[in-house]
């Protein structure tokens, strides 16, 4: 059975069930697997003929083996990656854009962003696990836009789960906000925080850090610090590289990055044996990871609003998972760095750790103007409309060797970001049919200051 340890503990044998139910490790660290399975790529290639769900079952089976979820996992995976949930026969189709490379479209789920891939599965796993809980689980999360709606969509109306989602007031797009606030089920509470996404994330971490409160409320996390999300995201990298176009090749991936969850999954896929070339961290102006690779100093800065709001993040939480590998498993070194970050807003990677990170990742930043420019050019060259997050990936892909061969993750549907699309191509993207009516429905949310006391009171009342 694969077990997990916290990034801040020297060892551990945390089960998958606990990693899922707890979200964040109890010492404030993030759960990471003690061992990784090795992929049999020929078997995966054969499974791909039966579609995405078959690949997902094969890639994820070793993680479920020996857990309480083992018997149900296949069914839950099959339900998740089905035509009822994802509105494209291939679930994650690849679209070639010629010299601009290829887009792996991860936006055919219910909320039109890649977060549906992990959260639709996680919602089902929570429900399957909650039978053993003494009360309903309360999911507490912070969203820069897309996690919130995907998590709410995955949990709405489920009997044993309540969900409380914080978003930075006025800093998510109207479509993103409405996807969260127009949900009518009573197990959903939306909170607009007067602050940035980093403030929201800090509040969530603080609530989890209050262990009494956390236990009393049965708090759990859905954002990308939950291991199960990373696990689910490994699948689409594997799915992409077994497509016929990549036989005998090791394509590089360009990944629009905020919290470092999505690209970390690609790193794990490569470690599991998937033939993947380079992994490019694509950022917008919020470039903490670009600066870290350049200088070795991981230094917080104020988050800057951009046209790609889901990436307006200056503390990439999942980077902590990579740090553990970069320091050769030395949890004390990781913990010391995170303490320095908390106290001084910066830590300096050791020379060896920096060399490790540089050997596994490239990084590149795109300004809003760069993104609009690539959106305009792709539209002119191919008639394909790109969202502003995917655009950061297309910009970064050009910095890699042979950009036409690079797979850029298409992390959101352009209809979620009509303002940027209008700026780039002079017309509005069309909202897919199942989203019609979004602008007519009433909204429900509570506004709070960025204050832990206020948040705790709102949770108690809920
Ligand atoms: C969340 C998100 C990202 C960033 O993903 P991380 O896993 O946080 O790095 C990029 N694009 C879109 C559209 C997103 O919703």
Image (cartoon, grey):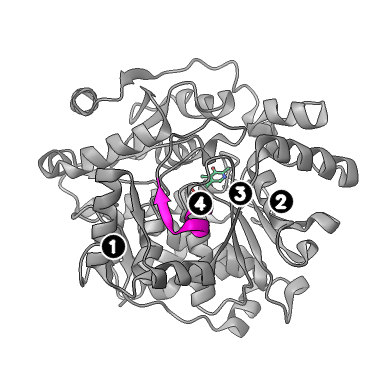
Q: Which residue is disc 2 drawn over?
A: 394
* Gap in angstroms between the C-alphas marked 3 and 2: 24 Å
- Residue behind mark 4: 291
Q: Secondary structure at mark 3?
A: loop
Badge 2 or badge 1: first in the primary sequence: 1
First along the sequence among labels 2 and 4: 4
Q: Which residue is mark 3?
A: 86
Residue 298 is inside the magenta segment: yes
Q: Please report the bounds of the magenta region as a residue range.
A: 290-299
> From what the image shows, is residue 84 above or below residue 164?
below
Q: CA distance from mark 4 to mark 1?
A: 19 Å
In this rendering, which labeled residue sits more in front, label 1 or label 3? 1
The reply to whether callout 4 and callout 1 are in contact (CB within 8 Å) is: no
Q: Of the two numbered discs 1 and 3 on the same chain, state the one appearing first in sequence.
A: 3
Q: Is residue 369 visible?
A: yes
Q: Quadrant of residue 35?
A: bottom left
Answer left or right for 114 relative to 227: right
Q: Mark 2 or mark 1, which is nearer to you?
A: 1
Q: Is 361 covered by the magenta stretch?
A: no
């Amino acid at each position: 059975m694969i077990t997990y340890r916290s990034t801040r503990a020297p060892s551990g044998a945390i089960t998958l069930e606990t990693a899922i139910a707890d979200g964040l490790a109890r010492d404030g660290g993030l759960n990471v697997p003690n061992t990784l399975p090795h992929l049999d790529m020929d078997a995966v290639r054969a499974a791909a003929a039966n579609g995405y769900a078959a690949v997902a079952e094969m890639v994820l089976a070793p993680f479920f083996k020996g857990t309480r979820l083992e018997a149900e996992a296949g069914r839950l995976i099959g339900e998740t990656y089905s035509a009822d949930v994802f509105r494209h026969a291939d679930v994650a189709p690849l679209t070639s854009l010629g010299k601009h490379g290829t887009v792996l479209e991860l936006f055919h789920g219910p909320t039109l962003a890649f977060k549906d891939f992990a959260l639709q599965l996680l919602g089902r796993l929570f429900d399957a696990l909650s039978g053993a809980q003494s009360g309903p689980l309360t999911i507490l999360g912070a969203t820069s836009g897309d996690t919130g709606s995907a998590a709410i969509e995955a949990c709405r109306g489920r009997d044993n789960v309540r969900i409380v989602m914080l978003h930075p007031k006025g800093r998510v797009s109207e479509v993103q906000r409405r996807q969260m606030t127009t949900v009518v089920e009573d197990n959903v509470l939306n909170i607009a925080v007067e602050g940035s996404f980093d403030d929201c994330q800090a509040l969530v971490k603080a609530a989890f850090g209050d262990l009494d409160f956390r236990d009393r409320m049965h708090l759990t996390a859905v954002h990308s610090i939950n291991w199960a999300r990373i696990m689910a995201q490994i699948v689409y990298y594997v799915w992409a590289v077994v497509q016929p176009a990549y036989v005998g090749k090791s394509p590089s991936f360009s990944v629009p990055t905020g919290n470092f969850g999505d690209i970390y999954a690609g790193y794990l896929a490569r470690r599991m044996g998937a033939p993947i070339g380079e992994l490019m961290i694509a950022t917008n102006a919020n470039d903490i990871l670009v600066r870290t690779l350049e200088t070795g100093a991981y230094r917080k800065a104020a988050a800057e609003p951009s046209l790609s709001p889901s990436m307006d993040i200056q503390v990439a939480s999942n980077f902590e998972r990579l740090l553990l590998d970069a320091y050769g498993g030395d949890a004390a070194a990781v913990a010391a760095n995170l303490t320095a970050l908390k106290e001084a807003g910066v830590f300096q990677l050791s020379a060896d750790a920096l060399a490790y990170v540089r050997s596994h990742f490239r990084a590149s930043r795109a300004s809003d103007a760069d993104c609009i420019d690539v959106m305009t050019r792709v539209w002119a060259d191919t008639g394909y409309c790109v969202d502003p997050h995917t655009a950061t990936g297309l910009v970064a892909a050009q910095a890699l060797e042979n950009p036409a061969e690079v797979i850029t993750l298409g992390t959101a549907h352009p209809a979620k970001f009509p303002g940027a699309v209008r700026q780039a191509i002079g017309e509005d993207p069309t909202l897919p049919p199942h989203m019609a009516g979004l602008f007519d429905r009433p909204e429900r949310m509570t506004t709070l200051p960025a204050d832990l006391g206020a948040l705790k009171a709102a949770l108690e009342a809920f």
